[in-house]
Amino acid sequence: MSRSLFRSAAPCAARRTFVAASLFVVPCTIARAEPDTAGCSDTNFSRMPGFYINDCERTDFDRFVFAEGSDHETAVEGRKARIAYALSDGHKAPSALAVIRNYQAIMQQSGWEIVENRHDAGLTARRVQGGKEQWAELDTNGGANYQIIYVDKGELSQQVTTADAMASALDADGHVALQINFDTAKSTIRPESQAIVAQIAALLKSHPDLKLRVEGHTDNTGDARSNQALSVARAKSVVAALVLSGAAPARLTAAGFGQDKPVADNTSEDGRARNRRVELVKL
């Protein structure tokens, strides 16, 4: 759940926002809120008033190099999220320093250590909590755009599921859940998951009478209608990849259930990651 240090705008009234120990006033303007990009949401902290998410990317395992001073960098691997914010039309842009000071204050209140402060260019922060290490980098482009990159440090947990393991699960339970990664809010299969698709193709080749329903599932980020459509598109993307590898289309059907069949709590990132899955169901 994200924490907020930022006050939402009152309609047609001057807005006062605390920035560390100072106070600035944003005059009333005719402003409209831009919608967030589909599939995107705040991570750890909410955004500055007047901003919307214009881009995001989430991966279950990736690497990012964080700056720690002018001559030192630290490469961190784990679950990564990149959230990019832009100012909505009609809103007055804060200074880059105001953006940084706001995030610096809420991060420090939440137990983050500021390991590098680049003043009006950005900052790097680190937190160890409950045995888990988290890193964050805030980058600004003036006051009208900024992005935050988070990495929850951890080992690669996804292992390639073999065709034999899938067959055993299908025989025992009638279905098997797979963590196939897609581009955020899209149905494009990411390169690191192509090996799993290849194992499904091998499963179909070694079991010529097997027919499968490929089911797409999402977490509850975004609205239910968009998630339903996305889950169907992802299931169809997997089916298309299998057909391209030589599987007969008549042996495969695609279905999507959006956020309606979670297998874990959506209030945590770990839970949401488990809910973003593809299931194979034996027909």
Image (cartoon, grey):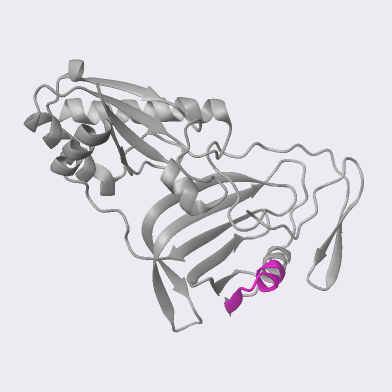
The structure residue drawn at horizontal position 74% and vertical position 47%, both measured from the top left corner, is: 50
Residue that protrudes farthest toward the bottom in the picture: 71
Residue 85 vs residue 207, the one in the foreground: 207
Residue 140 vs residue 273, the one in the foreground: 273
The structure residue drawn at horizontal position 76% and vertical position 57%, both measured from the top left corner, is: 6
The structure residue drawn at horizontal position 73% and vertical position 65%, both measured from the top left corner, is: 98
**Magenta-drawn segment:** 105-115
Residue that protrudes farthest toward the right in the picture: 13
Where in the figure is residue 115, as x and y percent of width and height?
Answer: 56, 79
Residue that protrudes farthest toward the top in the picture: 250
- 253 inside magenta stretch: no
- Any part of residue 10 in sight: yes
**Image position of 53 with respect to 74: above or below:** above
In the rendered image, which quarter contains the C terminus?
top left
Where in the figure is residue 60, as x and y percent of width and height?
Answer: 39, 53
- 112 inside magenta stretch: yes
Residue 19 vs residue 226, the one in the foreground: 226
**Image position of 99 with respect to 276: above or below:** below
Image label count: 0
Q: Which corner quadrant of the image does residue 23 belong to?
A: bottom right
Q: Is residue 187 rendered to the left or right of residue 142? A: left
Q: Which corner quadrant of the image does residue 123 belong to?
A: bottom right
Where in the figure is residue 37, as x and y percent of width and height?
Answer: 56, 38
Q: Is residue 76 rendered to the left or right of residue 110? A: left
**Image position of 166 with respect to 78: above or below:** above
Where in the figure is residue 126, as x and y percent of width and height?
Answer: 54, 73
- Any part of residue 117 in sight: no
